Amino acid sequence: MSSIARLTAAAAAAGVVAAAIALPAVGGTGAMFVSASEDLGIKPEELKEPPLAERTTVLDAKGNEIAWFYEEYRENVKLDQVAEVMKTAIISIEDYRFYEHGAIDIEGTMRALAKNLSSGGIAQGGSSITQQYVKQVLLNSATTDKEKNAALEASYARKLRELRYAMAVEDKYSKDEILEKYLNIAYFGAGAYGVEAASKRFFGVPASELSMAQAATLAGAVQDPNATDPNLGKQQRARLLARRNLVLDTMAKLGKITPEEASEAKTKKLGYKGTPIPGGCTASEVPYFCMYVRNEVLSNKVFGKTPKVRSRFLNRGGLEIHTTLDPKMQQAADRAIKKHVFASDHPVAAEALVEPGTGAIKAMAASRKYGNNKRKKEMSYNVVADAVHGGGTGFQAGSTFKTFTLLTALKEGMKINDGFSVGSGYRAPYYSTFKNCKGENIADPSHTVTNDEGGGGFKSLATGTWGSVNTFFMMLEQKVGLCDTIKTAKDLGIKRSDGLPLQEFSTFTLGTNDMDPVTVANAYATIGARGKYCAPMVITKVTDRYGKVKNYKPDCRQALDPEVADAGANILSGVFTKGTMRGVGGIGRPAAGKTGTTDAQATAWFAGFTPDLAGAVSIGDPRGAQDHKLNNINIGGRYYPSVFGASIPGPIWKDTMLSALKGVPATDFTPVNNSRFGGCSSCAPVRQEPQGDDDSDGVLEDADVDTVLD
């Protein structure tokens, strides 16, 4: 059978695209191909070219890179940022007539067609670089399996589609522009997309600095990057080495390099370095902050209406995300935690720093590294944040919650020196003593609350807070109302770390709800900002790949009467001089705070603030705080009979603040309005009660409480 007859048969069997490909071979000119294309109705078709998936860079407040997010590790570069030898290598092996032909390489296509006819299928590609670019665009644009399969199917129908698109691409761009686009979209293996990422991943150098052997290696990788992926093992590396040598031989055959240069380059080892792919929170120096940023974008509808849209925005958008992280404050938190708690300890310490008046998270630190290596006791979740931001269930916040009862009392008219007498234990007399916010009776008369810190006797708002007296705060919560206390906490942003509704039990004031440091620190920052609550924020600005900038401002509201906040700060400042932190001491500037220890030392906390910075520190055992309490334990190389809020969390907070605020001018708290909160509106009559314990059993009951609250 003659060649024309065979081609005619092929056309009949394969359809019009085979005929279009076959006809040019008869005349041997590209012009005839164009004519045949027109006769067969093969017209250019505009190719939709969505932006390539490009990495997103996360920056701290000083502009330093702290993390990268991407679906595909890619860094786009201009063609003049690619070594000439790389351009030569890729053209030599993939399409050596690239600058001579149009959308289709007739000679290459005919060779492929002949091979395919003899094999009875699609055995050889013969695609030009332009057609390969089209294929990669279609593959990258595919959002469903059906679309991906269509972009990869071995059929003449696919070739026809690619041809139409390639014709349009050749009309739209210059050859240099097409080559640049191809080099940026191609997959080279080892998780590297585009020549720049591949150069760094394979050899640790930018594309502009590739050597001849390195360029030949990358050029050889694009044909079948999975089969030659050097990251997969020796067999794949051997294949890649063979491909590299083939590229070098081809370059020599085409006269692009001399045979001697090819021989010398072939003597070199593969040289694959496997430079770690940058990015991801595991690789970040600030993994917990990184996780918070990532989950903020993925969960916040400000960044997209659906989870899928937000994920593509983050991982494919080529964004530059500016954040609130202060490197100096982050280092301060890291150092303070490492000083007091070792990564090898079973308990984990975590700290968050928040700026009052903006809600800006300045630092997030923990005593353990983030990761999945259980042997090294790495944390697989964000121990500093809530579940929405990658966290877990959190730890019970302990007596840090007494602050919300204190603020509620001040809101409802009590003065700093108002108070009552308390015993060593407290037991609710009736189920109706405490009602939740649904109006349901939830008191437990069978349960007696005792004092872990501080004793009985007369306690004012100030002295009861300084001593962190449990029985005082149970009585205070009874007086001001459980629901009112819960509402105050919610106004300051308090919500459970696990996302479940707050548990509304009578012991709410003792901190029985599971919390995270970010939430607690931000609540205390509200007091430091004179009652101005600002939602926690980490992102200040996003610049997209086109240079468009979107700024994000603090989301704030007045949650608390400023004078109530001032009075609360005044009382809480005494914790350092007259209360549970007096053994630790202050930080040489106005500061206020509250220790927190849960029942039987399951967890311990300290939350404190200045007008410039707030922070919260927690410590607990992630294996289960109730089963692994902080008693008779070694932490940070030191033995502790029992761990309280002032034992470890308080010193961590102090050391952090001393370093974080170094060089920052001290800001005073606003003085208390003494006409409103000074004095003692009910001290005299209350002081006349002996102990508020009519039957001298040390436990305040119904009649006792009625007496002291009258």
Image (spheres, grey):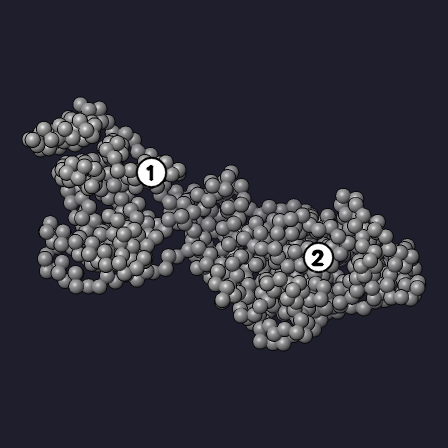
Q: Amino acid at mark 1?
A: Asn
- Residue 455's spot in the image, x, y percent? 81, 68
Q: Quadrant of the C terminus?
A: bottom right
Q: Quadrant of the N terminus?
A: top left
Sequence-first disc among 1 and 2: 1
The residue beneath circle 2 is 512
Indicate left or right for 23 with 434 as reference.
left
Q: What is the crowding at mark 1: few (fewer than 14 residues within 10 Å), some, or many (at least 20)?
A: few
Quarter holding residue 8 = top left
Indicate left or right for 276 with 90 as reference.
right
Q: Secondary structure at mark 2?
A: loop
Does residue 530 appear anywhere in the picture? yes
Quarter holding residue 582 = bottom right
Total marks drawn? 2
* Distance from Cα at disc 1 to Cα at disc 2: 54 Å
- Residue 248's spot in the image, x, y percent? 16, 55
Indicate left or right for 314 with 106 as reference.
right
Q: Say whether marks 1 and 2 touch (CB < 8 Å).
A: no
The residue beneath circle 1 is 149
- Residue 542's spot in the image, x, y percent? 47, 46
**At 64% from the left edge and 59% from the top edge, which residue is drawn?**
395
